[in-house]
Amino acid sequence: KQAEALREVAPKPTPASDAALETRVTDMIDALKLNDAAKEKRLHAVLVTDLKAVRESHNAGFAPAKNVRDDLNAGLTANLAPEQIDAVKEELTHGQAKRTFDTYHQIIPELTAEDDKFILAKLNAAREEALDVKNADELGPIFEPYKTEIEKYITAHHRDWKTAYKAYGAKRNAKAGRN
């Protein structure tokens, strides 16, 4: 009863937030270039349902129920190829996993295929968890423990992460003309 009461007093979606959500979904689907109206319609329903469930849960002060992500994954799997699913999840999480992966390679260029496998597994696990957040600014705390595991791995297999990161930051600042 308490949960239902909280949902009742939670901020309600506005026409502007619904329009922004629709635009985001349409842009994601357009980027996939599916050329299949029926599939696009099904995918649209899956994504809108997910994003609204995530938004409304957070507005009420709750994390989305487990079935919300399960339903998203089932809907994506039913309609898309694995690389398309990856693209949609990356878009839903604002590119955080790819951006982080690319940064690791900038900091430690000698990462191997085996390292990539470990790093991608951690980043994909973080991304999967991040599907439950409403806003991009909530991604950092979700990715942080996974990044810590990656950085410990890098230290154990390559070189001290903190030293490498510090050198990367100094190089980047020098390039930008900052001291």
Image: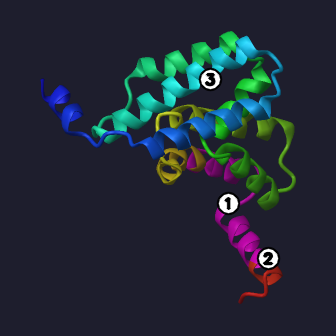
Residue denoted by label 1? 161
Count of labels in the image? 3
Q: Colour scheme used in the picture?
A: rainbow
Q: Nearer the viewer, mark 2 or mark 1?
A: 2
Residue 167 visible to an observer of this rendering: yes
Tell whether 139 sits left or right of 6: right
Q: Nearer the viewer, mark 3 or mark 2?
A: 3
Tell whether 28 sits left or right of 72: right
Q: Distance between the residues labelled 3 and 2?
A: 44 Å
Q: Residue at x 78, y 40 (%)?
A: 115
Find residue 92 and report its image quarter: top right
Residue denoted by label 2? 171
Tell whether 74 sits left or right of 137: right
Main SS of the magenta part reads helix
Vertical relation: 77 (above or below) 18? above
Q: Residue at x 62, y 23 (%)?
A: 44
Vertical relation: 121 (above or below) 38? below
